[in-house]
Structure formats: structure tokens, C-alpha cells
Amino acid sequence: MKWFLLALHFIIVHAPNGDEIGLNASEISSLREPRDAEGHWHKDVNCVIVMTNGRFISTAETCKRIAEMVKEAEK
């Protein structure tokens, strides 16, 4: 029997409405500060996370804070 060690590095971020979102840090592709595209993003969005599957996650946390959380999770 073979055993595999699977390491998941989850972080908890918050949607603009305060809901908690659990994300696997290794599936984050990039972090982007929202640009005002004629009201495309809610005023409380401080960072947009682009996931490896192409999904966008808007968060209340700043991109700097999320980057710190990812580094902490990967230790």
C-alpha cells in the first residue's frame, strides 16, 4: 500500500458582505487591486484573487494582507 502526503494550505478571507471564504493558497494564481471599471466592483472590494481555475474572488482584505496570509500558510 502506498501513502501520499497531501498538504493543503488554506486561508480564510472575507467577501465584501463579511462572509468567510476558505481558499487553498496553492490554487491562487494572482492578486489584483480592483480598478474602477464603471462600478464593476463593489466599493468594499480591496483585492481580487484570480484562482488557477479562472475564477475571480473579490475580498475585503487588501492584496498585501492576502499575500502575507499565503506566506504564513506555506510555512
Image (cartoon, rainbow, N blue to C red):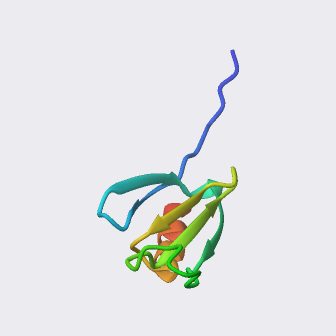
User: 29 or 11, which is in the foreground?
Assistant: 29
| Picture residue at 55% right of the left edge, 85% below the top | 36
x and y percent of residue 46 in the render?
A: 45, 79
Task: Give left or right: position of 18 versus 47.
Answer: left
Task: Give left or right: position of 46 versus 3.
Answer: left
| Picture residue at 70% right of the left edge, 21% below the top | 2
Which residue of the protein is positioned furthest toward the front in this rendering?
A: 38
Q: How many marks?
A: 0
* Quarter occupied by residue 50: bottom right
| Picture residue at 55% right of the left edge, 71% below the top | 48
x and y percent of residue 58 in the render?
A: 49, 66
Which residue of the protein is positioned furthest toward the left in this rendering?
A: 18
User: 31 or 7, which is in the foreground?
Assistant: 31
x and y percent of residue 1 in the render?
A: 69, 14
- Compared to residue 74, the image places residue 61 above or below, namely below
Task: Give left or right: position of 61 versus 52.
Answer: left
| Picture residue at 55% right of the left edge, 81% below the top | 38
- Compared to residue 21, the image places residue 13 above or below, namely below
